[in-house]
Image: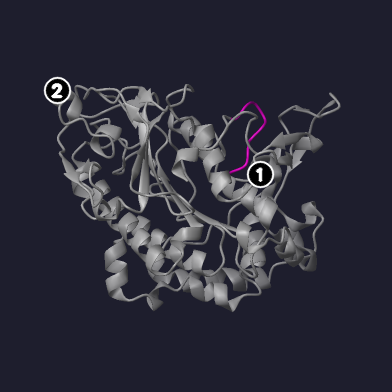
Amino acid sequence: MFRFDAEKTVKFCDGVRRRDFLHAGALSFLGLSLPDLFTLKTLGAVNSEQDMNCIFLMLLGGPSQLDTWDMKPNAPAEIRGPYKPIKTNVPGIEISEIFPRTAKHADKFAIVRGLHHEAAAVHDTGHQMMQTGKLFQAELEHPNIGSVLSKLRGARGDAPPHILLPRPIGNTGGNLPHGQTAGFLGKQFDPFVPPTNNFHKLREMVDASVKKFEVADDASLSDDNFHQAYTLMSSAKMRQAFDLSKEPDAIKDRYGRNKFGMSCLLARRMIERGVRFVTINQFETVFNEITWDIHGSAPFSSIDCYRDEVGPMFDNAYAALLEDLHQRGLLKNTLVVATGEFGRTPHINPAGGRDHWPQCWSMLFAGGGVKGGQIIGSSDEIGAYPKDRPVTPAEVAATMLHSLHIDLDTELPGLHGCPVRVIDHGVNPITELF
């Protein structure tokens, strides 16, 4: 995909404004031949101490803190909602009854309560900050943390460093970037998005995409083809990794036979084969489909979907993912992050749902050096605001970078050579997690 920002004025570091700024993903525009392309795999050779991975679960729509991981059973009914807390396998930690399988793995994850941000209460801004640590300003789109890892560490063998499943975030109402690309780093560090329209025929679709690339010339390559060349052209092994028919039916049943469940299973297969960072969007939009976005009336979801659809979908996939990573010895060097873009209003609205609320929400960290079985921070008596240890999206990003052994003082080459820190100065990781 070509993207020309010809209508935007660009300010360079020397203060000169120029037009016709080109942002393209084709090999010819990047000045790369196919042999040059494959040399990208040698970037940033690392030692075993730095060899960390991450699976980032974007719970699109914004899960309600009060109905998931920060329940208030003693609050009035219009605040506490319809669900009850259940005990976990860690004494003193309770979560919602909609997560019975996850409750058996509380020793593997930590709950961070008291997340908050002060930007507009729209999905897009939350997506930006939770996936890059920064709010986008004007022309400057910051890179996804997976893209930062791709830039600094490069690829392991034939595996693409960053994969996004099943599809990028679509329309969520704000018409803003969602923070899932490489931004100013350039298209070569965008995540690879496999053709996952049909998980049952994913291997065949990948093979067909490779054959299409083989007959294309360099000048016609889109960014999708760019990534296919990089990750798949020379690697039958990676193409086989997309063949979910190799997994037993019992495993697929544990994850859940839906897009999110199969994406989590595929993420485990990708990590096993050398992929460094996998982003999974549980949903692609908040309109006219069942999601965490429980305003209570169409085109959004009702609060009942947490019990009937969304909760079980997450519960099965998340529990199975932690089980598999742990049993295969991968959890210790794979950070698993599960978060939405904001929380929900403490008071149930007239439609029986909850609205956007960036003032307070909760998220989960597991693996990657995180000490499970603990809760970081707390909210007030109705889950409206942090009570102690408030946490910002920037601190979440710093925590991820810390787990991935990326120095927070690292500077990236920004637009037109202007250096940009991977995280703003003075922002620290959530050290209590480790």
Q: Up-down: is 366 above or below 393? A: below
Q: 227 and 348: which one is in front? A: 348
Whole-percent x and y of residue 371?
41, 49
Whole-percent x and y of residue 404?
57, 51
Q: Which residue is mark 1?
A: 407
Q: 33 and 250: which one is in front? A: 250
Whole-percent x and y of residue 228?
62, 64
Q: Is residue 91 left or right of residue 37?
A: left
- Magenta residue span: 136-144
Q: Residue at x 34, y 59 (%)?
A: 261
- Of the residues under marks 2 and 1, which one precedes in the sequence? 2
Q: 43 and 5: which one is in front? A: 43
Q: Up-down: is 314 above or below 115? A: below
How many numbered badges does the structure rendering display? 2
Q: CA distance from mark 2 to mark 1?
A: 46 Å
Q: Which residue is mark 2?
A: 76
Residue type (three-letter) at the residue carrying disc 1: Asp
Q: Residue at x 23, y 46 (%)?
A: 91
Q: Is residue 143 magenta?
A: yes
Q: Is residue 301 left or right of residue 39?
A: left
Residue type (three-letter) at the residue carrying disc 2: Pro
Whole-percent x and y of residue 138?
65, 26
Query: Which quarter of the picture shows residue 113?
Result: top left
State yes or no: discs 2 and 1 in contact (Cβ < 8 Å).
Answer: no
Q: Up-down: is 23 above or below 230? A: above
**Mark 2 or mark 1, whichever is nearer to me:** 1
Q: Residue at x 67, y 62 (%)?
A: 47
**Other-residue count near label 2 (Cα within 10 Å), few / some / many at <14 / 14–19 / ≥20:** few
Residue 125 in sight: yes
